[in-house]
Amino acid sequence: MNDLSPILSTVTASFLASFVEVVEAFTIVLAVGVTRGWRPALTGAALALAVLAALVLVFGPLLALVPITVLQFVVGVLLILFGMRWLRKAILRSVGVIALHDEAHAFSEETATLQRQADDRRADYLAGVASFKAVLLEGVEVVFIVIAVGAAHGQTLYASLGALAAFVLVMLIGLAVHRPLTRVPENALKFVVGLMLTSFGIFWTGEGLGAEWPGEDLALLGIFAIVALASFAIVRWLRGAYPAEGAAR
């Protein structure tokens, strides 16, 4: 179990984080495909995937040149910052301070924008750019997450498999239903991912500084539990501070 726990946590974190990002990119690509046709939608998406693959091929091998303790510390700090950003937004959404992300609304907004551009002779080009930008921006976050959660312990392959599984699952569901994945509990997933990335960040920052965690990799579970308890306490406090927003939600 001690050997499997870091692999399972790596795959899970990569899968959940990638799932959220792929859902958001899929919504835009679907809007482009439905409104302007699948040629610009798929062309833009394919070009973005090619750019992402090039980034991985160029920068991935460079990580092997960085001392492991330096890599753990740098990646750990970045994961804390990245995870806390996800966690902050998820907490504020859960108490109604900021609106929940709505894939149906995002789909209708993107569709309306593309329809307004219908008379523009560059309409197909602009549609392809929208698809390219969506896949590239969300894909960069996926690449960062895969590298971050996998590189510090040499588990990039497992992190990549988690991301690939998320991509395949979203594509299969999306192709089956041909509409935005509105039933995905996106805020709950972002909350969990924020907790996991923050926990990974704390763990690897400590290792980079030379800390010896009790139970080694199993200490991740304890860190996760502490971060989760603190986050739920913040949610409860904020619901008391913003009762109107919480009730509106």
Image (cartoon, rainbow, N blue to C red):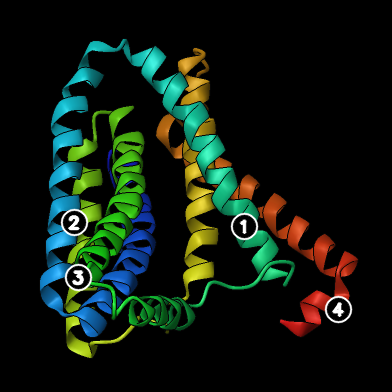
Amino acid type assigned to the residue bearing label 2 in the image: Leu
The quadrant of the image that shows the N terminus is top left
Q: Secondary structure at mark 1?
A: helix
Label 3, label 2: how many angstroms apart (C-alpha)? 29 Å
Label 2, label 4: how many angstroms apart (C-alpha)? 41 Å
The 10 Å Cα crowd at callout 4, few under 14, some 14 to 19, many 20 or more, is few
Amino acid type assigned to the residue bearing label 3 in the image: Asp
The 10 Å Cα crowd at callout 2, few under 14, some 14 to 19, many 20 or more, is some
Disc nearer the start of the sequence (3/1): 1
Measured as percent of width and height from the top left, residue 238 is found at 82, 62
Residue designated by label 2? 164
Residue that appears at 22% across and 26% down = 59
Q: Secondary structure at mark 3?
A: helix
Disc nearer the start of the sequence (2/4): 2
Q: Give the number of marks.
A: 4
Label 4, label 1: how many angstroms apart (C-alpha)? 18 Å
Label 3, label 4: how many angstroms apart (C-alpha)? 45 Å
Residue designated by label 1? 89
In this rendering, is residue 106 above or below 131?
below
Residues at marks 1 and 2 touching, judged by CB atoms closer than 8 Å: no
Disc nearer the start of the sequence (3/2): 3
Q: Secondary structure at mark 2?
A: helix
Measured as percent of width and height from the top left, residue 35 is found at 26, 83
Residue designated by label 4? 244
Residue that appears at 62% across and 57% down = 89
* Circle on res. 124: 3
Residue that appears at 16% across and 27% down = 58
Amino acid type assigned to the residue bearing label 1 in the image: Lys
Amino acid type assigned to the residue bearing label 4 in the image: Ala
Measured as percent of width and height from the top left, residue 140 is found at 32, 45
Left or right? Give the position of 225 relative to 207. Answer: right
